[in-house]
Image (cartoon, grey):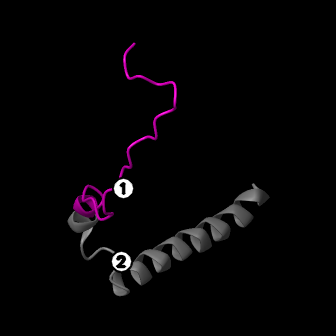
């Protein structure tokens, strides 16, 4: 029964810390545009890599 005296305050402190972190994230506008992040990951921002033709070997005739 003595352990309950220790566990209840610890659980209240952890719950309060979680609530404080959630309120902080709301006030710092962490959840403003959840749809935009999901769409941005699908966009291709990088330019395509230029492909150079492969140099042919002297004995490569191109027929197989």
- Left or right: residue 38 compared with residue 52: left
The image position of residue 20, as x and y in percent, is 48, 80
The image position of residue 53, as x and y in percent, is 38, 44
Residue at (51, 31) in percent of width and height: 58
Q: Earlier in the sequence, mark 2 or mark 1?
A: 2
| Circle 1 residue | 49
Q: Quadrant of the N terminus?
A: bottom right
* Near-viewer residue (46 or 49): 49
Q: Is residue 24 magenta?
A: no
The nearer-to-camera label among 2 and 1 is 1
Residue at (51, 71) in percent of width and height: 18
| Vertical position of residue 5 compared to residue 54: above or below | below
* Near-viewer residue (51 or 38): 51
Q: CA distance from mark 2 to mark 1?
A: 34 Å
- Within 10 Å of the Cα at label 1, are there few (<14), some (14-19), or many (20+) other Cα atoms? few
Residue at (41, 79) in percent of width and height: 25
| Vertical position of residue 51 compared to residue 47: above or below | above
Residue at (35, 80) in percent of width and height: 26
Marks 2 and 1 close (CB-CB < 8 Å):
no
Q: Quadrant of residue 13?
A: bottom right
In the current view of this chain or complex, which residue is farthest to the front?
Answer: 58
* Near-viewer residue (54 or 19): 54
* Near-viewer residue (13 or 35): 35
| Circle 2 residue | 30
Q: Total of numbered circles in the picture?
A: 2
């Amino acid at each position: 029964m003595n352990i309950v005296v220790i566990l209840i305050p610890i659980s209240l402190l952890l719950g309060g810390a979680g609530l404080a972190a959630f309120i902080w994230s709301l006030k710092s506008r962490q959840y403003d545009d959840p749809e935009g992040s999901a769409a941005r990951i699908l966009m291709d921002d990088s330019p395509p890599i230029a492909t150079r033709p492969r140099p042919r070997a002297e004995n490569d005739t191109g027929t197989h």
